[in-house]
Every structure is written in structure tokens, then in C-alpha cells.
Amino acid sequence: MIANTTQRPLLFSQPTQPAAIPSLRDYQISAVESAIAELADHRATLVMLATGCGKTQVACELIRRTRGRSLFVAHRDELLAQASTRIEQFTGVTPEREQAGSYAFRSGVAPVVASIQSLSRPHRLEAFDRNAFELVIVDEVHHATASTYRRVIDHFAGAKIVGLTATPDRSDGSALGKILESVACQYDLAAAIADGWLCQVITRRVVVAGLDFSRIKTVAGDLSASELATVMEQEGALHEIAAPTVELSEGRKTIVFASSVAHAERLAEIINRYSGRDVAMSINGETDRDMRRLRLREFADGRWQYLCNCGIATEGFDSPDTSCVVMGRPTKSRSLYAQMLGRGTRGGTRCPVGDKTDLLVLDFVGNSGRHSLVSAVDLLAGSADDDEIARAKAWAEQSERPVEVGEAIAQARAARAAEIAKITAEARRGVVGVASYRVEATDPFSTLGVKRDYLTQRYGMSPASDAQIAAIARALGKILPPPDLSKHEASHLLQAFADRRQRGLATYSQVACLAKKGCDARTWTFAQASATIDWMSKNSWRRPSAGTVAAILGPE
């Protein structure tokens, strides 16, 4: 956690908004107000908005309402250029630049837009007073655990910090809690789609027999880049990705994410071959800057249908009319996948882009081995649990058409409900002579003192997993488990079963059996319950008298 040193109070102006300033959406206003509220009690807070939901707009409004000087820090040219333009629109002041050969005034009032690579250099950073800024905004803050960011944040000890990101989770496990103290706002992809700010996502999982990721090592939480490139650059895999891309994209403006520079170049070449004309081009971090800008502009203008890239069209790249994203770079990182997916999610019903209605995502899958690769289902599954997500992925993989994620989850839940119903029916057939009612003593919740969590069930808590249901069924014996268990409830029940075993108490089969004969065996030991059931079996299953029970139980 960063040191919460004594701060000068950060004063924000009233939220008056000149007509020339772009209007903010309701969730953006909420994000601004929440950030201001959090900064009253904390030094550093997080604003998480899904890609395409206007993090820069929120940053600009915070800068406009800050009475003192503000600093905006980012790590890419595109992010800095976008921020400079927007800040000027919001404030009417041209921000100063701290990047490469450009130097901002060390004292002044104009906002500063800075490259982290330049600003973190000791001779540049130390030229600024530690109290030079009231507010520091860190864009793509999931990168901020790096030493360069820490150096800047620690230097400006007098400033409040707002971190912006669409993807707060880091695949390498570095905790943002080292930088940020609170969360002001979380507005994720599923919520933005449901509210109509982003477009619907449909997914098609394409099985490629030649792809085998099973032997690839994991480095910093994701597939080894070099080993992944070796697999993806194989001639067979290239064709098995390029051909379906041309067939399934059906004229959509498409961004293709590749695993290496060579992979991007070869995919563009083979896509052109399958298309019969020049419709694809490639760019990467090694492409000349002017050429890169030219090709991105040409793609935006419609000169190219396919943009094959390696490490370029992720953060800070906008192409709202893109309606197909090809995941030719398999990943275990939710953060990276979300960045790639977000390049095509703009254009919801509340902010349409041309005639775009949805985003098609092509996931290419093969033998993943021990790796759990991220897909669109993972990001948009909402309250679905791991079992439902796995089932939804399998169903989408078998489908011969693109499907909405919600449809895949619904199919998974239906299949799971059918399996549970089958298991329940089989268990019911195995019950002989059980009364049609359940006495209180055989209710596991009543017996264990575990409360039913009806409210969390009603409002979307994940249902119990198949493994939990099976374990509960074993523990209950011939008593059927409740059909509407939540994962939370099942966990508490299983823990209570374990505690009961450890204390040597009667099993639920014993409790149920004895309850039918009027014996409350909830507090009996396993040995006491066994002895009583043995007596009943030898006496034509007669109900034991109080005296017989007392004799079996012995002195208390």
C-alpha cells in the first residue's frame, strides 16, 4: 500500500458544465462523483470502466473540476494524444506535454500530459516540486505496479491519485492494492452491454486440430510468448485460422490479434490469398511510426477490411465500426482478452455506430492441456459459476453458428438442470418406504443450524456445483438434497457435515431412519444411533420405548 502521507485538501469546483463541453453519460457522472467522494478519505482510488465507456471523459471532468494543477500519465502515444485533445475540449486550456523532446513548465497552472517513460527519468522527475500537482491521473493503471509508476507516484507525495482501467486484474498476480486504497466505480462490460452503451457480443469457437498448447509453459500468468509464437506460426495453423476468418467474417471490418510479428505478417498474407485481393495488412511495434499511423488511418477509412496486428491495436486504439475480432493470440489473461475484445464493442443501442448491430468474436481453440484459456464467455458470463462457464464454452464450440453468450449460458444451465433432475429421479427410485413428508429432524438446515439464504438465491447467487450436490447427496444418504441450493449454502452444509463427522455424531441416514420412529437423534453419537437401529432391526422395526432408548443411550 502506498504511504498515506498528510495531504493538502483537494478542492473540486462545483459541477457546472459549459455548453461547449461534451455531455457526460449517467454512469460517467456517477464515476466522477464517486471518485471525488473517495478522495475525501483516501489518497488513491480506482475507476474501472469497460473499454469504450469513456475513461478519458471521466479523467477530463476530474481535471476540469480540480482547483489546482493536474497531471495525466500514460504509456502510449495514442493515449497521450487522445487525452490532450479531450482535456482541451473540456477545459479550454491546451495541456503541456512532458514526452521525449517536449518539456512542461515545472510550475504553472495548465494540465500536464506525460509519458511515463519520460517523466520517470530521475532528472526530469526531480525537476518538479513534490507538491506541483493536486491530482495525478494514471491511465491503464493495471500497469502501475511497475517501478516507473511507483517512482512518479511516490515523488508527488502531495497529490491525490486516480487510477483508470478497464481491466484491473493482472495475470502476473501483482496487486493493485499496493497502489490504490479504494474502488470508486466499477462498470463492467456486461453492464455496459445490458444498458445499451456497448453492442451485443456473439461468439464462434473454431476448433483447430493443429493447435496444441498443452506443452507451452506459463510465464507471468500467461502462455509463454515465444513458445506460443512457435505453435501459431506453423503453416497448418496459419491456414486453419485464415480460412475460417475470411469465411466467417462475411465482410465485417475485422481486427486480427496475432501472437508475434511474423504471425501477423503471415496471417495478412494468407488472408489476402484466400480473399483473392489485398484486403489485409499488418502492423506491429516495429513498424515505422509514420507508416503505422498511415495504415491505422487507412483502416479507419475503410481501405483495409482486416488489420492483423501484434501488440498495437489494444490499449488506446479506437475503431468504433469494427464488428469482428479474431483472437489469433490465445491467452490465459482476462485483462489482455478484455483489451482485445474491447476494440470492437462500441456501438450499442444508445450510441449507434452506422448500421453495426453486434460484434462477432472468433475464438480459435485446440488442445489446451492444463491451460484454461479465456474466451468471451468468461468475460460476459455474469453470475455463472465455473461449471456453467465450462459447459457454455463446450456448447458454443459444438454449435455450427455464432451464438450470444447469454444463449450459451442458458443452454449450459438447462443441461445442468436436466442432469440434476436425472440424478434426483434416480435417487428417488432408490428410496424404499420413506414417508412423503420430511420431519424437522431430517432437514439438514434445521439440524445443523444453517440458515437458508433465500435472498441471495433470488438475486443471482450461483447455484451449487455438481461436485457439491454429489457430496451432499452422499452425506444425506437416502434423503434428497434441496433442489435449489446455492453455492454459498452448499459450502456451509458441507463444512457442517465435516464438523459433525469430526465430533462423532450420528449421520444423516441414521437421523432420518430414527426420526421416522419418533426418535430425535440429532445430538446422538454415531455409536448410540447405530445401537438403536440395531435394536429396531432385531425387533421387527418396532418403535423403541423411552425406556429402551434410555437404556441404549446410557447415562448422560
Image (tube, rainbow, N blue to C red):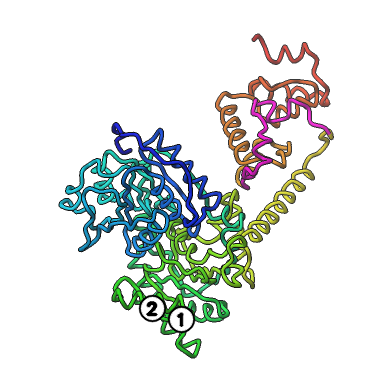
Q: Looking at the image, is 488 positioned above or below residue 17?
A: above
In the picture, measured across the screen, residue 11 lies left or right of residue 521, that is left
Discs 2, 1 touching: Cβ within 8 Å: yes
Q: Where does label 1 land, which residue?
A: 304
Q: Residue furthest bottom?
A: 276
Marks 2 and 1 sit apart, C-alpha to C-alpha, by 9 Å
Judged left or right of residue 447, residue 254 is: left
Q: Residues within 10 Å of mark 2 (few under 14, many from 20)?
A: some
| Sooner in the amino-acid sequence: mark 2 or mark 1 | 2
Quarter where residue 537 is shown: top right
Residue shown at 78% from the left, 24% from the top? 536
**Residue type indicated by callout 1:** Trp
SS type, badge 1: loop
Please give the name of the residue rendered at 23% of the width and 43% of the height, measured from the top-left corner: 155
Picture coordinates of residue 233, whole percent (x, y): 38, 76
Left or right of 357: which side holds 238?
A: left
In the visual, does 81 lie left or right of 199?
left
| Front position in the image: 356 or 133 | 133
Q: Which residues are magenta?
A: 437-466
Q: Callout 2: helix, strand or loop?
A: helix
Q: Alpha-carbon neighbours of circle 1 within 10 Å: few (<14), some, or many (≥20)?
A: some
Q: Position of residue 463 (x, y in %)?
A: 64, 44
Q: Which residue is mark 2?
A: 295
What residue is shown at x 53% (from left), y 78% (from top)?
244
The quadrant of the rendering that contains the N terminus is top left
Q: Please tell me which residue is depicted at 69% across the width and 41% down the height of the picture.
A: 458
**How many numbered discs sit on the rendered protein?**
2
